Image (cartoon, coloured by chain):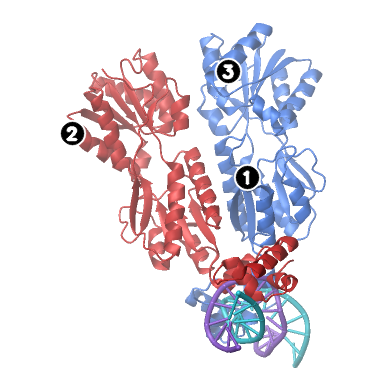
Chain colours: A blue, B red, C cyan, D purple
Amino acid sequence: MVTLADVARAAGVSASTVSYVLSGKRSISGITRERVQSAIDDLGYTPHAGARALASNRSNVLALMVPLRSDMFVPVIMEIVTAVVTAAREFDQDVLLLTGDEGGDGLRRIVRSGRADALILMDVELDDRRIPVLREVATPAVLIGLPSDSTGLTCIDLDFAATGAACADHLADLGHRDVALIGENQDVYRRHTGFAERTLTGFRKRAAQRRLRFVHRPCEGTYESAAGTLTRIFGERPSTTGFVVQNEAAIAPLMSLLRQLGRSVPEENSVLAICPDQVAQQTSPQLTSVPIPAEEMGRGAVRLAMAQLSGQSTVGSTLLPPKLTIRESTAAR
Amino acid sequence: MVTLADVARAAGVSASTVSYVLSGKRSISGITRERVQSAIDDLGYTPHAGARALASNRSNVLALMVPLRSDMFVPVIMEIVTAVVTAAREFDQDVLLLTGDEGGDGLRRIVRSGRADALILMDVELDDRRIPVLREVATPAVLIGLPSDSTGLTCIDLDFAATGAACADHLADLGHRDVALIGENQDVYRRHTGFAERTLTGFRKRAAQRRLRFVHRPCEGTYESAAGTLTRIFGERPSTTGFVVQNEAAIAPLMSLLRQLGRSVPEENSVLAICPDQVAQQTSPQLTSVPIPAEEMGRGAVRLAMAQLSGQSTVGSTLLPPKLTIRESTAAR
DNA sequence: ATGAAAGCGCTAACAC
DNA sequence: GTGTTAGCGCTTTCAT
């Protein structure tokens, strides 16, 4: 194994000089920097992470806790994870992967062992049991999602209230008067994951302002549930022409049901989805949609974690503005 | 921070005794073990990972490299990742996540820095550019997937040849004479990911033995491509009654097209898919299928990595036997 | 069955 | 601008 001492010897300098060339924490003459650098290259030297962590009290690792079972759509989770890892590398950090079932104990273990310098938590619930541990360990941490009490915490998420409002606005602008929000299944609401409620609240409020009449229906991701939901909506309010869908799994059944019912989209009904662009684009007709900004959330979480590590306070919630992309599934009436 | 020295002092023993209580590498009297253990509990001690790595030359970390863009279905990737992390924890290992785009350099960096003791690579291509690095660093490594030259390497994968054969057998057993294999898109075959070819080979060989006539057609995941593929197949061989689908995205369009063509499943046509159980079960009718054993692959990879770390040789390929689950989409004719 | 002590490879004062 | 050196917290001989 090639050590810093080997490099120092080869370059004819002291160990500290090599260390400082690497860290840039003090000025080095061009000539020695070169000698050191070429010794590093020649020998193929990479600093020993453990030694570095021990001496500097910094691991250069971010711990990312991903949900095992989640309300999120799996591809979105993967996109966030990918964004986190990619962004972390740009800060010279590696990413340690923890599963949600490790819970608070897992976080405590990671922090106490000095394996990671900061924590990023995905799929945060309104009353998340990991949050007390976060306050206890007082380690830099970022939540992807919004708990009910975010005092003293750093959070990042899509602004779901604004998303709901944007959807209501879009349908109102198009002249729709009776609209329906087809949401996630009851479990999601019961588990208090937050985003579903926030969307509903934002939608309801704006709908009232725009004088829309609206109903909200939770829905399973199955064909049967979608059929039942749709039947009930049309039964209660046959004049419904606008739909907002916040449930990836329900989109396909719903579109196919509307077609079967002879309710063509977008001529007779407008459909708006909160889903990844990929899903919106492979549906026919392509859906007007608001995507979860997975990439931005992942990158943002890393940025916030790094800011905390450099001593800045990032307390508060970063709510990313929704971006509504108009495609083929919504039209004026 | 609580250190081993703190624990030793609290327990009234030496540092080495505490260390040995933790590692179990020498016998300790019951009484001291208890004293040490309660000191650990009282103080909330967790060993410092960096110090441990430095002194023992072992990080207790497995590096897992996941593909960014992959031919695999994203939920399957997630399932493998989850299985790896869960299994790793049972061996007291943490998992460091690397993205495929870090390539060989990333692996070299991880190994040289001592950040991980072993490597697990997903989505291995036939002529994977990371393989030379694997041979160069001579670190314990496991490939999930099968490269063309696996000499000296440890691999684990589904036995796709046996999978193809099992599909051919099932259709032959049901009395089908003309069958079609609807595969992944051309890109996958061109990129030489291996599994597609192996399925084809296994299917072709067994089909010949069972005197089946068969055609193979790559297919995109779009409705249009599925329609074109199906039209061509029925055009060339109208007598085709059995289908094997190895392309998650093509399943839904295909089923809906068969319905439109009045070819009911399973009465007139049998359809067999190589896809996750979840997909097979939410299709209507539920599909007879062979799933990718993601859980087994992840766990197996960890097991193999740990075996290598304990000095055992695991060179060779572990090919997991396919498990064909009969559901509603295949029937005798 | 337990202790003492020498490092593991690096960082960061402290010197000059 | 560079060198010297004292640790960081742990494992592991070598003693006893």
Measured Cα–Cα span from mark 1 to mark 3: 30 Å
Which residue is at a point 50% across and 64% down the rendered structure image?
B117
User: Three-letter amino acid code at disc 3?
Assistant: Ala
Q: In the drawing, what numbered circle is on residue A226?
A: 3
Answer above or below: position of A142 versus A188.
Answer: below
User: Three-letter amino acid code at disc 2?
Assistant: Ala
Viewer-closest of A323 and B2: B2
Asked which quadrant contains residue A175, the reply is: top right
Residue indicated by mark 2: B208
**SS at badge 2:** helix
In the shown orientation, is residue A139 left or right of residue B200? right
Asked which quadrant contains residue B131, the reply is: bottom left
Question: Chain letter of disc 3?
Answer: A
User: Three-letter amino acid code at disc 1?
Assistant: Gly
**SS at badge 3:** helix
Question: Chain letter of disc 2?
Answer: B
Measured Cα–Cα span from mark 1 to mark 2: 48 Å
Residue indicated by mark 1: A100
